[in-house]
Every structure is written in structure tokens, then in C-alpha cells.
Amino acid sequence: MPDLRISELTMNQLIIHVVGLGVQANAKLDEYAEMALLKADCVLGSERQLNLVSSYLSKHKNRHNDDFCQILPTLPELEAKLQVLQEKRFTDVVVLASGDPLYFGIGTWLNRHFSAHQIHFYPAVSSIQAACHKLGVTLQDAHVLSVHGRPVESIRRQLKPNRNLILLTDSKSTPQVLAQECIDAGLTKSILHICEALGYESERIRSFTAEELVRQAELGFDALNVVVIKTSNQPSFYPNFPGIADNKFVTDKGNGKGMLTKRETRLSILSLLQISDKDIVWDVGAGCGGVAIEIGYWHPQANVFAVEHNEIRQSCLEANRTRFGVMNNVTLIAAKAPEALQGLPKPDKVFVGGSDGNLEKIIEYCWDNLPENGVLVTSAVTEDTKMTLQSFLQKRIAKNEATYESIQLNYAKLENLAEQSAYRPALPVTLFCFTKQLNRTC
């Protein structure tokens, strides 16, 4: 049975008009948005938004009805609210939004739950656009982030030199908190422009270096603000290119040692996996999270499930999720494979880096759950592990159901030895990569 959306099952008659209000103290709607508002059975918005359109609502025939103007509930409650309106035989509902509803706005949620013919959008200038024009920042050259209702640490993947960052904030992501993030990244001379109450009489823009701002903890800002950060030309803690240095990870033996896939091997694994946007990835035996964190950092739209049963390594992985700001798309599964894999979303790509003696069961389970063109990458150091993977390879060849490649990595690192320099070789690592091919002809 196809996966039908809620709207197609229960709300076929409901039409939702999403009206952006722009950046101004009193909304100025075009004729189409005004028409949608005047024919609505119900208007949903925050108290501030309802006040912005009060002059339009005063003309409405239903303005005295108790059900007409309602406070927009939180997203988890909105679905139930719209079902109630449907049951009351409402046909036209207006949802008020700030600026452009489809740019970090409620439109994204509505598109996931309703059919295209049920939703009409009426965009306006957003606070992001307004801030750019106030400061002369070119929007296409900026990186727009929302930390509204999201962990502030999620900005860390963008804290790199010479960038324009535009942030939608909330009460937890204050300018001082954002400045501290810049300092922790080593970008101490970054400039933060705080654009407050844009479009209102109280509008103002204040600028500080990160160092200045953290020293003024008592300084207050209007809750309605957009922060534009121009990061400094200083080296950042956070990487600019794949291959995060081992010593930047929190590990169970410190200084990048312990159960962490090392950078040289990790880069080859990333190359073999070829992660795409919106891929679902399983990292089985994730250890301290080297592969999972690196995937999540460079691919914010991928969803990574890092499976690790060792409690010490779990705590390291959690620390690395926060350190690199990948809490939104890297999930720790604190259990042992293959049992831990049951119930997870089906993967597009799988990396098996550890198995705790269950390698054969794990790779068979992963293979069975991969779609056509899905990729399984595994690593081996011991001869026993290589033999298991060779046996798995022979099965795939016999069934003619995979393309494959295998490489062995040998490298050595320069270290100090008795006050001399010497290259210390690492243990060779063998990588196997299998791509699933169904119904292949010989």
C-alpha cells in the first residue's frame, strides 16, 4: 500500500492560505493575500501576527465569531487543530507567517502534510532579506541558519573563516552565546551585527566583535532579532575539508587514540560510501564516532544512525556529536548489533567498522536491508575478519548480485623515537565495498 499523507486521507476539502506578513509594524498585504484573508473561515497566527493584520480583520464578516481568530498552536498540535476545523466544515483557513513561509518557515511543515492543491502561499519580504539589505550583504553569498528551537551548537559546522552567517535566533541563542561560539572556534575577531525589531519604530542595528560582546553579558537585545556574523580571517577549530584530524575527537584513550577510525582510513571509507543528500546511513560498531561524525558534518541532510554498545565509547560519541554540531542528523543507538538494527529506517549506505564477534550476522542483515544500488563498506584488520568478508564476497559473486572492490591501506606516520624522527607504520587495513545489484544477467 502506498504511503499516503495525512491530508490525502482525512482533509481533502481543507484549503490552507499561508500569508507572509513581511517586516513592518503593520502588515501591507497585496490584493491576493487580502482576498484570502477576507474570505477565510478561520485565521491562525501568533498574538503579534494577529495584531499586525487587525485592520484587515476588522472588515471581516466573521470577526465576532469565537472560532475566527485563534492562536497558532505548536507544530505537534497543529495537525489536530486542522482536523478539528475540518470537522467543523471549515473550508478556507489562513495561517499567518513571518516573511517568506517557505524559507525556514511553517510552509515546509505544511508541504509535508498536505497535498499541493490544498496550499496557497503568499510570500513577503523576510527578516533575513531585510537584514541583508540593511547591511549590504549579498544573500546568495551568505549561509542562512536557524537556531530557533534548535541546539545552538548546530552552527559549528559553519564556523569557518571569511563567511557571512545569517541566523534566526531564539531566547537560548542570544548574541552573547553566539559570540562565545565564535571565540571557542578560534574566530575571536568575528563581527556580529544584531538587527533588532526590523520594520518597527524601535528598529536598531548594533555591531560588536565577538570579544567585545562576551564581555557585555548584561547587555540586552530585542527578542525579535536576526544576527549576521562576519567570521574573521583566523584559523578555525572546525575543518574546511573532509578528513578531520584525529586529535580533534573525544576518544576513549585521549588525543585521538582508542576506538576511532583514523583519518587516513576514514577518508577512503567516505570515498567508497559516496553519501548523497537525504541518505539514511548505518554506522555499525561506531566506536567514538569518527565515520558517523564526519558523514553528519559534511552531509547535514543525511541521517546517520551510529550503533555502539560500549558505554565509554557511547559517551565519547555523544561528546563528539555536540563538539561538531551534528546532533540533528547523527543519532546514537546505544545497543548491540545486529539486534540494534531492527526497527531502524532502512539504510541507503552502511559502514561496518566493528562487530564484537558478530560480523557474519551483521553484514548479512545489513545486506538484506539494503535497496538496489545500496552500498555496504566494511573494514578488516585481523585475518579472521578478512576471511569472513572473503566468504561474504564469494556468496555475492555466486549469486551475481553485487559489484565490488577491495583495497588495502598501508601508511606510516612520523613520530619521535629516542629523540630521533622515525616513521611508525600503522596496522594494514583492508576495506571491502559492495554495491547491491538485483536481477543482473551473467
Image (cartoon, rainbow, N blue to C red):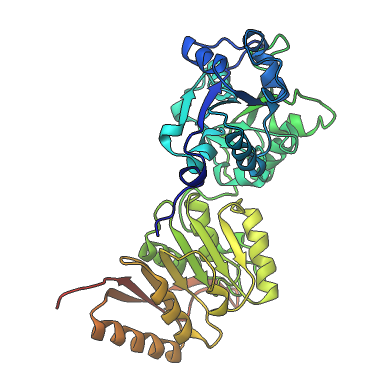
Nearer the observer, 13 or 273: 13
Left/right of residue 149 with respect to residue 352 in the rendered view = right
Left/right of residue 421 with respect to residue 52 in the rendered view = left
Q: Position of residue 89 (x, y in %)?
A: 57, 31
Res. 163 in view: no
Left/right of residue 338 with respect to residue 360 in the rendered view = right
Q: Quadrant of the C terminus?
A: bottom left
Nearer the observer, 163 or 64: 64
What residue is at 68 percent from the left and 60 percent from the top?
A: 319
The vertical placement of 142 against 377, above or below, is above
Left/right of residue 405 with respect to residue 300 in the rendered view = left
The vertical placement of 12 against 340, above or below, is above
Res. 242 in view: yes
What residue is at 47 percent from the left and 85 percent from the top?
A: 361
**Residue situated furthest right in the rendering:** 218
Q: Quadrant of the N terminus?
A: bottom left
**Residue situated furthest left in the rendering:** 442
Q: Position of residue 197 (x, y in %)?
A: 69, 18
Nearer the observer, 68 or 52: 68
Q: Position of residue 430 (x, y in %)?
A: 39, 79
Q: Position of residue 183 (x, y in %)?
A: 69, 41
Res 290 → quadrant: bottom right
Q: How many numbered marks, from 0 up?
A: 0
